[in-house]
Image: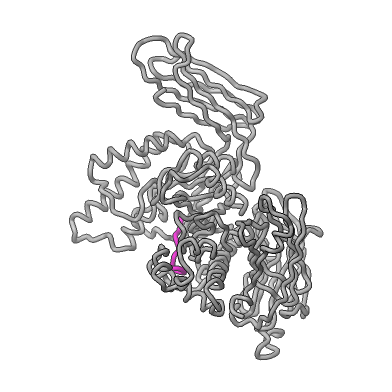
Amino acid sequence: MEDVHLRQQHRNGTVTLSAAVRAERWDNVPLVAHLKVTTPNGRRTYETHLPLEGNQGQLAVRIRNPQLWWPNGYGEQPLYDVEVSLEAEGTVQDRKQVKMGLRTVDLVREPDAWGESFTFVVNGVPVFMKGSDWIPADSFPTRMSEAQYEHLIRSAAESHQNMLRIWGGGFYEDERFYDLCDRYGMLLWHDFMFACYIYPHDEPEFIENLRHEVNDNVRRLRHRACIALWCGNNEMEQGWADWGWTNPNDPLRVLEREAYEKFFYHTLPEWVHELDPDRPYWPSSASSNVPFQAPNSPERGDMHYWDVWHGRKPFTAYRQQFPRFMSEFGFQSLPPMETIATYADPEDWNMTSYIMEHHQRSGNGNGLMVAQMTDSFRLPKDFPSLSYLSMVLQAEGIRYGVEHWRRNKHRVSGTLYWQLNDCWPVASWSSIDYYGRWKALHYAAKRFYAPILLSIEDQGALMEVHVTSDLTEAWQGQVRWALQTLDGETLRSGEVAVSLAALQSAKVCSLDFQTEIEATLDRKREVIFMADLYQGEKHLATSVATFVPNKHLKLVEPGLNVQVSRSGKQAVFEVTAHSLARFVELKLAGADAIFSDNYFDVLPGRKVQVTCVLPQGWTLAQVKKALRVQSLYHSFA
């Protein structure tokens, strides 16, 4: 078989799955194509066959009451076994076997009050895309094992992500990667492999090479449930529009610009439509879909926003942005000390040492981290505290942006932070480091990407509480809030009933504490606002906001206490404190444990319970001995 094109058509609760078969021929013997589709549970099979006319033919089966494939968080990911075979004189000559998820994916771009929408709709449901950008997971890709791939994709799913963007500066991934995305419900925004560069799109030989590249990869991947969108390139349109590539006085640049527009707005989308007419194409990331015009437009298309990182703007700048789809933004951190120790000796544990600057993707990245750190936190007391604090800083920055955009989901349709993973041990924008260790950002993502999100929009003395739902049915619960001192005294409190329609975000209360926090000069430093989200008596989330930067809080030794027990194969940790403990980090020395939650707040008089899988072969006594605990206070005191 030279080519097999599998397609699915959904209508009135039935899916027609078709296979267009094209065979290579060397003689005129009769050829018969067979299509066999088996349900995910293996209990039912749909079959048909067809003699080919010449070298091609199209087969189809109708699947009634199909089991639909859903993105992570919206349903299951059932995969049908599909087999297409080619017979000559009763002998199978060739066979193609794949797994397919049955679903529809549309990119809805319609005029609205803010410009033009940019919303992915899956099986008729508008889905807010929650995810991150994917880069090659190793500088030597052949080292990647199935277990490493699965750890990364599973970790994305466990943090409630439903989309990854394959960055155009990487490569077309291994089949194992796409298999895992199909299994875990991870939709893919798939860049073609062009990024940040002027390519020779005016050279016929190069274009012919690209035709083969696109043909091979789109044909290889177009049957997969995970592929949601084909995108022309990464940031090249920004280069022409904003980075000074355009020079009308340079004839060569004029030709290159024209070649860019011809390729990404005409040639490539024509190829993609011919090969895969069932998926949307987008010319560039970021783009407004108008050549060279406002590629980062807040009115249409997708946006890359880097003014906080490269532009040194405060995290509050995220709240000034209302993109239709935020496909890239980020902030760096150091990796955990266990990773730093693999490439830097203790004498190099300094942000301006040669080794630390060498293991830094962004030229002035270490300085940018420290500068932003001084806006929010006290300078750390030692280098391990700096590593911890940089991860907390990164998590807080990305949380600040994502919560804002999810609160405005009626206008913003997705956020993909830069980036999920690393290709070597390094300071970077990733939420999971090269060795698979979850940084503070990944734990924060598990909270800020939760299906029901509790968030606080702090505006000086004014605290607005929001609840955002990604559920496809109505939701009811309660918010319990309090103005408290750092040692737990409640100054004012209340409870608000929450009732949300499906896929809705709403402000549930607005509270002004001007009188209370202005009582004395230092009052702002001594109090916090906190909110709890409940469904019935089930506690879902806690959110804490301060009236001053964390560096100005009058934190004291919190008196952290951790009781450790065992439940089956899990270690259970119950954490308490006498005074507010911010961003509590748990670690097990000698083990890369992933906790059910980490870098969390512990309020006085409250108990936070988290778990982790007991390291293989470990006893409870070993866990207790290996446990390490710190908080924001311990980073400077």
Q: Residue at x 78, y 68 (%)?
A: 495
Question: Is residue 218 something one can see in this rendering?
Answer: yes
| Residue 321: image location, x then y, percent | 50, 66
- What is the magenta range? 301-309
Dominant secondary structure (helix, strand or loop) of the stretch shown in magenta:
loop
| Residue 368: image location, x then y, percent | 44, 72
352 vs 14: above or below: below
Answer with left or right where residue 630 lies relative to residue 323.
right
Magenta region includes residue 306: yes
Nearer to me, 402 or 335 = 335
Q: Quadrant of the C terminus?
A: bottom right
Return the residue found at the far right.
537
Q: Quadrant of the N terminus?
A: top left
Q: Residue at x 72, y 53 (%)?
A: 570
Q: Quadrant of residue 39?
A: top right
450 vs 372: above or below: above
| Residue 295: image location, x then y, percent | 39, 58
Return the residue found at the far bottom.
521
Question: Is residue 325 something one can see in this rendering?
Answer: no
Magenta region includes residue 211: no
Q: Residue at x 74, y 57 (%)?
A: 620
417 vs 46: above or below: below
| Residue 460: image location, x then y, percent | 61, 79
Nearer to me, 310 or 120 = 310
Q: Quadrant of residue 454?
A: bottom right
Q: Quadrant of residue 542?
A: bottom right
Answer with left or right where residue 516 lies relative to residue 263.
right
